[in-house]
Image (cartoon, coloured by chain):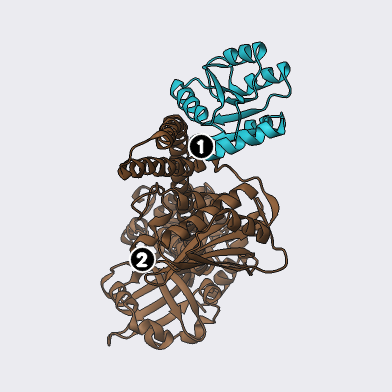
Chain colours: A cyan, B brown
Amino acid sequence: MATGARVLVVDDDRDICETLRDILEIERYKVTTVGDGYGAIDLVARQPFDVVLLDIKMPGIDGFETHRRIRQITAELPVILVSAFAVGEAIQAALNDGVFAAMKKPVPIARLLETIEAALKAS
Amino acid sequence: MPSRIDDPKTGANDPGGAERRVRNARDSLRLEDLVSVRGGEVYHGILQAAGVGILVAEIESRRFIYCNDFMCEWTGYPREELLNLTVDRFHPADQLPRVLAEFEAQARGDKLLAAGLPLLRRSGEILYADITTRATTLGGIACNVGIFFDVTERHQVIAALRESESVAQSLVVSSPMGMHMYRLEDDRRLVFTGANPAADQILGVDNSQFIGQTIEEAFPPLADTEVPARYRQAASEGTPWQTQQVDYADEQIQGAFEVHAFQTRPGEMVALFFDITERKRAETELERYRQHLEDLVAERTRRLEEAQTKLLAADRLAVLGQFAGAIAHEIRNPLAVISNAAYYVKRQSTSDDPRVAKNLDRIEHQVARSTEIIESILNLTKVDLPNLETIEVTSSLKHCIESAQVPERIAVRVELPTTGVFVPADATLLQLACKNLIRNAIQAMPGTGTLTISLEKTGGSDAAGVAVSFSDSGPGIPKSEQESVFEPLFTTRTHGVGLGLAIVKMIMEHHHGSVSLESTVGVGSTFKLWFPTGAGGQN
């Protein structure tokens, strides 16, 4: 189990952010939430994180673009895409581009936790 | 002319008169002499007033020596001029030999009548005359005394008649229409009397063989038709008759003929006919061609309608897919929140009430079900035109079966060949179709059961391909529902959207293949995917 790993949750749906924070905090992760891509990039630039859960469809810049900009700041930070739209060629491109995993909402929590752990180990 | 009679009182017994006659005979015989010879003015009057021409010619010189008034008026010659003419110049040159022969014969007393001899008017016009001649001696001169009857008019009528007969004859002979002539006897027998050359040519027989036979004897097949009665009516009553088509066949003559029958004179008739066999054949040909065109149009229309129906169905599915897809995506977020929230409550709940946990399970289960529905709807948007590659089917199927997570209650029998089987297909769509059929089979067997997946090659140039069958041992589908199972939104289950089989059908159509169903209630259902491998399936 994780021991205080820092998770950044990026989603424009406030309820998604809040419920994920609640769940992840049960597992003793340190959770930061933010509602858009710009905010996420800003946070990553200012403070360290161990893993990012990133939505794709958001106002402003989308998850793919946010991912590219995050990689420019830090290449090591693992990013997991969690989206209602986790299908198609863009996902495959993102995976090729270094995204650790892409998961479809609603994600079974057990699988989400497994994937976060795998990402932490890999980095 | 009484004024010319110088001495009407001079009689035959005048002794000086005879001498004078002899003296003048070489010149011309004068009327006065004649009158005096015949002894009466009466004769003279009669001769002049007669409605016939009288002309006297000296036999030896063939010179005219007497003419009456009628002769002058009729021929247009003044008397003096006519009496200076000879027979030779009084008739058309080309007729002279005949005229002179007649003249000689009459002079010999062999012949009295020369019928229809032509003679020349002074104007050059030709007149015709029947000439009765008597050779006699007048005043010692041997003469032919000719009485001329004007038959010019009769001659013209006869000539016209001959002309018209010759026209009629040539019409009959040269007519391209066949002609059969009949005569109706008193005993009602209709007897064949002749035919024209065209009839021989059209019928290909010598029609003279029929002359004297009745119509029924000559043309036996006509006996059973209305033709003889119509011909008799034409002959006896003059009622014309025509018919577009008489079909005829005996040993000598075969064909179809258009016939026109009419009376030629009371009791006789002619039937004009021509061969319309060729025309009939052309018409039949045309009719067949027209029918063929109609069939072709009907066939094309049917195909178009089919294509339109398919397009409509595909269109409906595509629009449905786009619309449903957009909604499905949006529903994922609230589902995720519900799912997350339930998870959290379940983890953190301290309630002893077992129903709390049970209800949280319900939430999770229904979220999972909703997610599944969304997946099936989204599959619609994935069904695009296939990207055909050569796919090895058996390994593709094995992969499908493994990832399908068939529950343990269901036995899976896989009957696939050990060697590779290749079909042109879209790998993703092939997987989707198979996955849908496997899931369908699983859902058809809520209890235990057997899912059999098999593969066979189909033969024939049209049917060359590969068939993959998915058989379940479920309850089967009633006949009444078998047609509908491939329609979008059709489902017999209490849950499920009813898109799985519609998607399979769409995928197979995109591959120019097919999906078919065989099902028996109480035994189970078999869905068969058929992929063409022949040239027809490659486009």
Q: Crowding near pointer 1: few (<14 within 10 Å), some, many (20+)?
A: some
Residue B119, position in %: x, y? 52, 58
- Pick whichever, B36 or B59, lies toward us: B59
Question: Which residue matches tag 1?
Answer: A109
Q: Name the side, left or right, on which B81 lies relative to B50.
A: right
Helix, strand or loop status at disc 2: helix
Q: Chain of mark 2?
A: B
Q: Is residue B45 visible?
A: yes
Residue B86 vertical position relative to residue B419 in the rendered view, above or below: above
Q: Residue at x 56, y 74 (%)?
A: B201
Q: Crowding near pointer 2: few (<14 within 10 Å), some, many (20+)?
A: few
Label 1, label 2: how far apart the Cα atoms are: 45 Å
> Mark 1 against mark 2, which lies toward the viewer?
1
Respond whether the residues carrying marks 1 and 2 are from the same subunit: no
Mark drawn on residue B479: 2
Quarter of the image for residue A69 reads: top right
Residue B527, position in %: x, y? 49, 63
Residue B276, position in %: x, y? 48, 67
- Pick whichever, B388 or B416, lies toward us: B416
Residue B177, position in %: x, y? 49, 67
Q: Chain of mark 1?
A: A
